Amino acid sequence: MKKTMRQNLTIGMKLTAIASALTVLSLPAHAEQWRGWNIHPPGYPNSIALESFAEAVADKTEGRIEPKVYHNAVLGDQPDAIEQTRNGALDFANFNMGPMGPIVPATNVLSLPFIFKSVDDMHQVMDGEIGQRFADALAEKNLVALSWFDSGARSLYNTQRPVETPADVEGLKVRVMNNDLYVEMIDALGGNATPMSYGEVYQSLKTGVLDGAENNYPSYESSNHFEIAPYYSLTEHLILPECLCIAKSSWESLSEEDQQIVSQAAEAAAEEQRQLWAERSQTSREKVLSDGVKINEVADKSAFQEKMQPIYAEFIKQNPQLESLVNDIQAAQ
Ligand code: GTR
C-alpha cells in the first residue's frame, strides 16, 4: 500500500516536472522587452495605434518580443527620446519630423513652411519613393522608419487676437518645437519664437511667458491649450509627417521573420492611425468650438508664404545638397 502511494507520488512528481519543463519550453527563450516612447495621452489616435502595434508584435511573435508603450512623454521630451532611440536605450517611438531636423538634416525639408499643399499631397509623397529617401536618411542616424503617421496641418493659436495677416503675429511670443527653422519662421512674421518642449507649453501660456503656439486640432485640444489660447487661425503653415521608428540596434537583433512581423504591424498601425486621425480632427474641432474657441480662416495665405521665401533661399544656400529634394517634393504635387 505504502509502496503504491510512494510510487504514485514519484509518478506525480515526474509528471509535474515534465509539465513545468513543457511550460518553460513553450515560452520564448528570452522574451525581448521593448520600450516605446509616446508623447501623447492614452486615447489619442497615435497612442491607440502604438498600442495596436505593440499587441500585434507580441501576438505574432508569440511573445518573443514584448513591446510596452509609455505615454505622455514620461520617458523624456521628444529631442531626448530621439537620442535615446538612436542609441538603443529606447526600442521604438512615434516621432514628429519637426524636432528630427537638428539630427537628420534631410528631414528639415519637411519643415520648410508650406512645402506641402495639402495633407493628401504629403501622404502621397511620403508613401512613395521620396518617403523612402527620408527613411534612408533616418536609417543613417540609426532610426528605422517603418511607417508614416498623419499629423494634419499645424496652425497658429494665441491668447490675444485672430491672426489674419502676418502683421497680426507681430510681437507675439510663440512657442515652437526644437528646430531653428521654426525660429526663423516666427521671426519672419515679426513674432518672438521660443523653442520649448511640448509639456511646458500649457503652464507657459497660463503664466503669460507665451502668448501662443502652433499645432494641429487634436494636439491643441488634447493638451488643453485651447482653454487658455482661444484664437485658432488656420494658417496651416506646416504639414509634418510622423514616423513609427525602431531603434536600429533593436531592428538588427531580429530574425528576418520577426522583422517582417514588426514591419507589417507598423504598416497596420499607420493605417489605423490615419483613420482615427481623420475622426479625431473633426471631434477635436467640434470640442474646441463648443468651448468658445474662435477659429478663423486665413483668406490670403500667400502673404504668409511670401514671408517664407528668404527662409527657402537661405536653406538652399546652406544645404545645396538638399535642393533637389525640395524641388522633387514641389514637382510631385
Ligand atoms: C504634436 C506632435 C508631437 C509633438 C507636438 C509638439 O502635434 O504629434 O509629436 O511634436 O506636436 O508640438 O511638440
Image: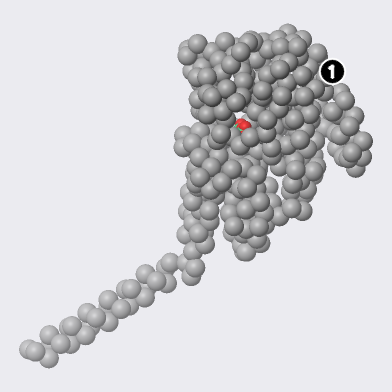
Q: Quadrant of the C terminus?
A: top right
Horizontally, is 106 left or right of 203 in the view?
A: right
Q: What residue appears at the point 52 percent right and 23 percent down from the top-left corner?
A: 206
Horizontally, is 205 left or right of 133 in the view?
A: left
- Residue 303 in the image: x percent, y percent? 80, 13
**Where 323 sits versus 117, above or below?**
below
Quarter of the render that holds ligand 1: top right
Q: What residue appears at the point 63 percent right and 35 percent down from the top-left corner?
A: 196
**Where 224 sits versus 197, above or below?**
above
Q: Front-most of 310 and 24?
A: 310
**Where 189 sits versus 81, above or below?**
above
Mark 1 closeness class: few <14, some 14–19, many ≥20 residues within 10 Å: few
Horizontally, is 12 left or right of 278 in the view?
A: left
Q: What residue appears at the point 15 percent right and 87 percent down from the top-left corner?
A: 6
Q: Front-most of 103 and 204?
A: 204
Task: Kindly indicate the quadrant of the structure image that contains residue 258.
Answer: bottom right
- Residue 134 in the image: x percent, y percent? 77, 43
Q: Quadrant of the N terminus?
A: bottom left
Hey, which residue is sitting farthest bottom in the picture? 3
Quick check: can you spot residue 221? no
In the image, what residue type sits under mark 1? Glu
For label 1, the residue is 306
- Residue 238 in the image: x percent, y percent? 72, 27
- Residue 277 in the image: x percent, y percent? 57, 29
Quick check: can you spot residue 222? yes
Q: Front-most of 12 and 34?
A: 34
Provide the secondary structure element on which disc 1 rests. Answer: helix
Q: What residue appears at the point 84 percent right and 18 percent down from the top-left corner?
A: 306
